[in-house]
Image (cartoon, rainbow, N blue to C red):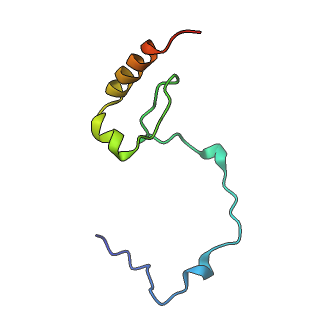
């Protein structure tokens, strides 16, 4: 790791914080590291025990479609 020489462990970091910051969001750029998702997709968090069984979203969708086919249509 590169030592920048700007760090002083004896200096109180609260002295450097301002009570409020004004950000210029007109200069903001999209995060290039985020994987874009399909507009029709929904993110769901699985419990750990369920995630052990279903490793991919395709497996979850297949199981849910099987359940949906067993439910009578109204």
Q: Is residue 3 left or right of residue 28?
A: left
Q: Position of residue 29 (x, y in %)?
A: 54, 42
Toward the viewer: 53 or 41? 53
Toward the viewer: 10 or 35? 35
Identified at 60% across, 80% down, the residue is: 14
Q: Look at the picture and state if 17 lies above or below 69.
A: below
Identified at 41% across, 40% down, the residue is: 46
Rendering quarter of residue 7: bottom left
Q: Position of residue 4 (x, y in %)?
A: 37, 74
Toward the viewer: 55 or 13? 55
Q: Is residue 50 left or right of residue 8?
A: left
Q: Position of residue 26 (x, y in %)?
A: 66, 44
Q: Is residue 11 left or right of residue 57?
A: right
Identified at 62% across, 74% down, the residue is: 17
Identified at 70% across, 59% down, the residue is: 22
Toward the viewer: 13 or 72? 72
Q: Residue furthest top?
A: 73
């Amino acid at each position: 790791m590169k030592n920048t020489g700007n760090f002083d462990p004896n200096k109180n970091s609260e002295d450097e914080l301002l009570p409020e910051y004004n950000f210029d969001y007109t200069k903001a750029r999209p995060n290039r590291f985020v994987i874009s998702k399909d507009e029709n997709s929904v993110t769901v968090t699985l419990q750990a025990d369920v995630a052990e069984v279903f490793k991919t979203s395709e497996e979850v969708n297949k199981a849910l479609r099987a359940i949906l086919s067993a439910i009578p249509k109204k």
